Image (cartoon, rainbow, N blue to C red):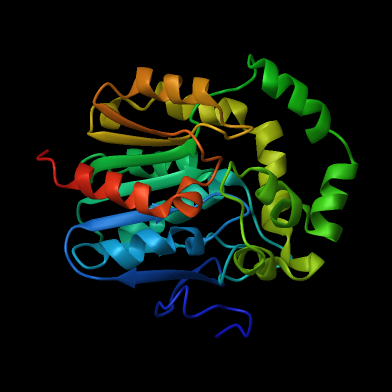
């Protein structure tokens, strides 16, 4: 099931597939040792964790999934692409793969998806690593209120479906000082080469509009894992998930270690991988 566009030098990982709801979810499983479970957001896939995995697989077992509709996973025309269903799928994956204890690594939509799944297995969740994400309702956030005008526009799904708007335009604009190269951007655009492969990104737009109560439910019920050692890595030039989101996370996870990256935007693992790797390695060596 190799893809001709895939840069196998940048992403030299063996493909694995997990059957779910009649479709194939792609994941990678590299290295041995304590488990790091990576959960991506939009419009990304396991590719955006490649730098971390290439380094950390020397000492850890690194597992990174592609949500259905993303990356190298199937992209069916008819499917429940809701954020909640991605979370339930991750729960099934953890259970069916019989994963023992793990550290959860999440970014963007991977935050609510991954943390919801972790809450189903609090006894297995050792640590949390969060990169530019959220976990609560944004209904009272002035930035979100302004964004809802865009989210409600019938033009937005059209742009996402017919112009591949999310990876082609939204993703590059979310970077800070470290701009994405053309070659790297292709690894984010090519999984969505055709309009019928873009249902996943369209669904995440709808999620921002309709799932705020669900996000807040996760925040309110985070108690069983809220006191786990947590690493918050934050690109401070993120135009959407801003510094006040970091402060909110700090308020809810009292054992948090914070690493701020002043020149990075929404994708610190892509923009400053060496600094992210260094922070993660240091965090993982501290005793629980």
Q: Nearer the viewer, residue 11 or 181?
A: 181
Q: Position of residue 199 (x, y in %)?
A: 72, 58
Left or right of residue 20: residue 154:
right
Which quadrant holds the C terminus? Answer: top left
Pick out the residue farthest to the right.
Answer: 155
Q: Is residue 75 visible?
A: no
In the picture as drawn, the residue positioned furthest to the left comes out as 287
Which residue sits at x=57%, y=23%? 137
State the image coordinates of residue 32 (x, y, percent, origin top left).
19, 69
The image quarter in which residue 71 lies: bottom right
Q: How many marks?
A: 0
**136 shown above or below 24:** above
Q: For the point 57% across and 78% down, which residue is it?
A: 6
Where's residue 145, x and y in %?
A: 73, 20
Does the image show residue 271? yes
Which residue sits at x=57%, y=31%?
Answer: 241
Image coordinates of residue 60 in percent, x first then y, are 21, 62
What is the quadrant of residue 143 in the picture?
Answer: top right
Locate the N terminus by quadrant.
bottom right
Residue 222 image-quadrant placement: top left
Position of 1 relative to 112 (above/below):
below
Q: Is residue 115 left or right of residue 7?
A: left
Q: Nearer the viewer, residue 54 or 121?
A: 54
């Amino acid at each position: 099931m190799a893809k001709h566009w895939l840069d196998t030098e940048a992403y030299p990982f063996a493909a694995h597939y997990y059957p779910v709801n009649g479709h194939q979810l792609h994941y990678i499983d590299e290295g041995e040792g304590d488990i790091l479970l990576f959960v991506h957001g939009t419009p990304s896939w396991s590719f955006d964790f490649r730098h971390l995995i290439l380094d950390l697989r020397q000492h850890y077992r690194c597992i990174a999934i592609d949500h259905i509709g993303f990356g190298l996973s199937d992209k069916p025309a008819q499917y429940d692409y809701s954020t909640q269903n991605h979370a339930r799928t991750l729960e099934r994956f953890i259970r069916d793969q019989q994963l023992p204890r793990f550290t959860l690594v999440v970014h963007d939509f991977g935050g609510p998806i991954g943390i919801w799944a972790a809450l189903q297995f609090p006894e297995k969740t050792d640590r949390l690593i969060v990169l530019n994400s959220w976990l609560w309702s944004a209904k009272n956030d002035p930035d979100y209120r302004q964004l809802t005008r865009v989210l409600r526009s019938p033009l937005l799904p059209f742009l996402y479906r017919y112009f591949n708007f999310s990876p082609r335009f939204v993703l590059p604009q979310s970077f800070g000082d470290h701009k994405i190269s053309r070659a790297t951007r292709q690894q984010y655009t090519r999984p969505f080469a055709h309009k019928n492969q873009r249902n996943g990104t369209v669904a995440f737009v709808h999620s921002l509009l309709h799932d705020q109560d669900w996000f807040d439910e996760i925040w309110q019920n985070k108690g069983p894992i809220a006191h786990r050692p947590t690493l918050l890595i934050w690109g401070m030039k993120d135009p959407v998930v801003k510094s006040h989101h970091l402060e909110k996370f700090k308020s809810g996870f009292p054992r948090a270690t914070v690493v701020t990256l002043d020149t990075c935007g929404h994708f610190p693992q892509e923009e400053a991988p060496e600094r992210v790797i260094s922070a993660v390695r240091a965090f993982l060596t501290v005793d629980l």
